[in-house]
Image (cartoon, grey):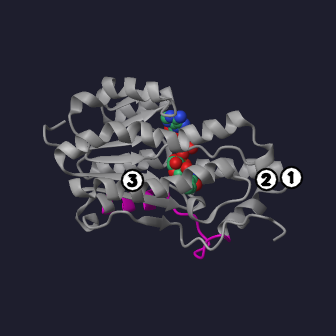
Amino acid sequence: MMADQAVALITAGASGIGLTCARALSAEGHAVLTLDIDATAVAAFQTEFGEQTAVVCDVSDADQVVAAWGQLIESRGRIDVLINNAGIAGPQQPVEEIDVASWQQTINTDLNSAFYVTRLVIPLMKAQRSGVILNMSSSAGRYGCPLRSPYVAAKWAAIGLAQTWAMELGPWNIRVNALCPGSVGGERIDRVIVRDAAERGVDPEAIRNLYLRQSSLRAFASAEDIAALVCFLVGPGGQMISGQTLGIDGHTESLANWLDA
Ligand code: NAD
């Protein structure tokens, strides 16, 4: 890594949208780092980006985040971009049937992790008097989504935190925005569709079509679409964009997902 090379930290960046963002930012000249729970994916990330770029870490656990910070990030001395990307789908159940452990696991992963990591990153960004923080929300964080209560709670909070941190950190030239993908094409949405279909006892194609109809463009965004938006926000075009919630979803019209609606 070059001494003055910009550094981007992406939580849960060893696969999925996070990995696609890491590749795009790397191509634009950033050194990329990740904290990810999956040891196999972390090893692959290290092979692709270098030994000192990734560490196995459950970002829903504040102590693990502090340990990983000391192991991987502190010595870098700077973070230019933070993407609070970690997020699990959580239970898909009526709210009264969700058990407390599933609620807490989803909130810890999708919301609390952003606090655990951001609180460590901010002092570096303040010292640099620059930085970009992107909270990965979801169209569910703007519209609500039946049967996904803890996910929605966390994704709604990601937007509120982006607006609040934009206010707190703007005077240090730190920009904070929330990104709201809709359904993103790829393995994760395939898993969600199969699980949703199994729970409802219907054909997965019916669920896929239901999700596609939620967006005006009748299409899923790709991880590359999201990475392109990230690069725009980090780059010169994004210099005056802060406190915003940016949909990248082909225009979600509704997330009501009742098959008989
Ligand atoms: P994914 O399911 O593909 O997982 C990406 C990575 O998260 C994996 O490498 C996994 O190991 C890691 N991870 C999971 N739990 C972790 C933890 N506790 N600590 C550290 N790493 C952990 O996810 P994705 O589809 O790439 O989604 C990324 C983000 O985008 C999430 O916040 C998600 O809510 C959001 N999002 C995704 C979609 C979609 O359709 N894929 C839509 C809207 C929003």
Residue lying furthest bottom in this view? 216
**Residue 4: horizontal and vertical position, in percent?**
13, 42
Q: Nearer the viewer, residue 115 or 67?
A: 115
Precedes in sequence: disc 2 or disc 3: 3
Task: State the separation of the CA atoms marked 2 and 1.
Answer: 6 Å
User: For the residue marked with disc 3, what is the amino acid?
Assistant: Leu
The range drawn in magenta is 213-232
Kind of residue at badge 2: Ala
Label 1–label 3 contact, CB within 8 A: no
Spatial separation of the CA atoms under disc 1 and disc 3 = 37 Å
Check whether the beta carbons of the residues at disc 2 and disc 1 lie within 8 A of each other: yes
160 left or right of 27 in image: right
28 vs 217, left or right, is: left
User: Residue 1, how many percent across, how many down?
Assistant: 19, 36
Q: Is residue 118 above or below residue 183?
A: above
The residue that disc 1 covers is 201
Q: Does residue 2 show up?
A: yes
Position of the C terminus by quadrant: bottom right
> Which residue does the numbered mark 2 point to in the structure image?
197
Residue 13 visible in the current orientation: no
Dot 3 alpha-carbon crowd within 10 angstroms: few under 14, some 14 to 19, many 20 or more? many
Q: Is residue 224 magenta-colored?
A: yes
